[in-house]
Image (spheres, rainbow, N blue to C red):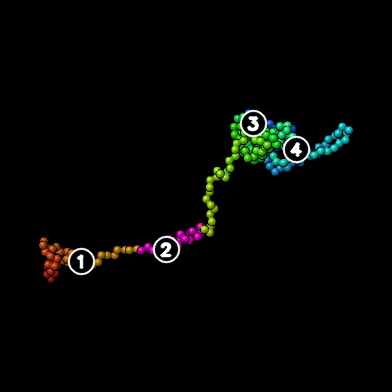
Amino acid sequence: GDFQVASQKVFSVGNLNDVMVWSSFGNIDNGRGSNTAVAAPALRQVRAADGTVRYESAPVTTGSGIAVLQDDKDVCDKMGTCNVTLTAVYGEILALDTLIRAGGRVSLAAQVVKGADNIVGGSVVGAPVTVSAAGMAISSPPPSDPSKNKKDDAVAGSTTEQSRKSQLTVELIGLGMEPTGAGPADRSCLPGESDEDCRLRGRKSAD
């Protein structure tokens, strides 16, 4: 099944400790906690061999998720400890909100690993290379400037008005006076007759 940290913590505090989580068919979810959370455990009562009692304070822890918190990294390196090993054989490893941390090695094995930028360790094995979201973003148009829009509208309106004023409307009223009666346009000239003779004959006919 799934291993879900949710808002809790899976911490191992010390220099000789490891954390190992295995899920055959589920996912390993690092949770939705805060990376800035601080936890200060209560004082611990320790009784010595001579019967005296003293109080010791446990280490203060920060963050959430899955982590190995060491006191001395040199000891971790020397002993090969302080490691986190997460295996989701047929599932996913999710580190979307909180960090997976280890002073030693962080080993991940899963079908899919999400949140590689939230994995911190001395060495990280099995996490994909993180691609910058900025390089994948689709450029969006620049924000609209209301003053510029008003200026553009004013220029467009002025251009439209100038275009309207420059238009010249021509209406065809007539082609002059139309001939009436038996004018030259109504009579037929005889074959071979000149225009002058045709007009004279027309006048005589009109008289």
Which residue, given by chain and number where applicable, does mark 3 sit on? Answer: 87
Q: Residue at x 49, y 58 (%)?
A: 152
Q: Sort mark 1 into few (<14), some (14-19) or many (20+) by Cα contacts within 10 Å.
A: few
Q: CA distance from mark 2 to mark 3?
A: 74 Å
Which residue, given by chain and number where applicable, does mark 1 sit on? Answer: 179
Which residue, given by chain and number where applicable, does mark 2 sit on? Answer: 162
Q: CA distance from mark 1 to mark 2?
A: 43 Å
Q: Residue at x 62, y 31 (%)?
A: 109
**Which of these two is toward me, 197 or 183?**
197
- Locate residue 162: give its quadrant: bottom left
Q: Amino acid at mark 2?
A: Gln
For mark 4, give the secondary structure: loop
Q: Position of residue 206 (x, y in %)?
A: 14, 69
- Locate residue 133: give its quadrant: top right
For mark 3, give the secondary structure: strand
Mark 4 or mark 3, which is nearer the start of the sequence? 4
Q: Amino acid at mark 3?
A: Thr
Mark 2 or mark 4, which is nearer the start of the sequence? 4
Q: CA distance from mark 4 to mark 2?
A: 81 Å
Boundaries of the magenta span: 149-168
Q: Amino acid at mark 4?
A: Asp
For mark 1, give the secondary structure: loop
Q: Sort mark 4 into few (<14), some (14-19) or many (20+) by Cα contacts within 10 Å.
A: some
Above or below residue 115? Residue 181 is: below
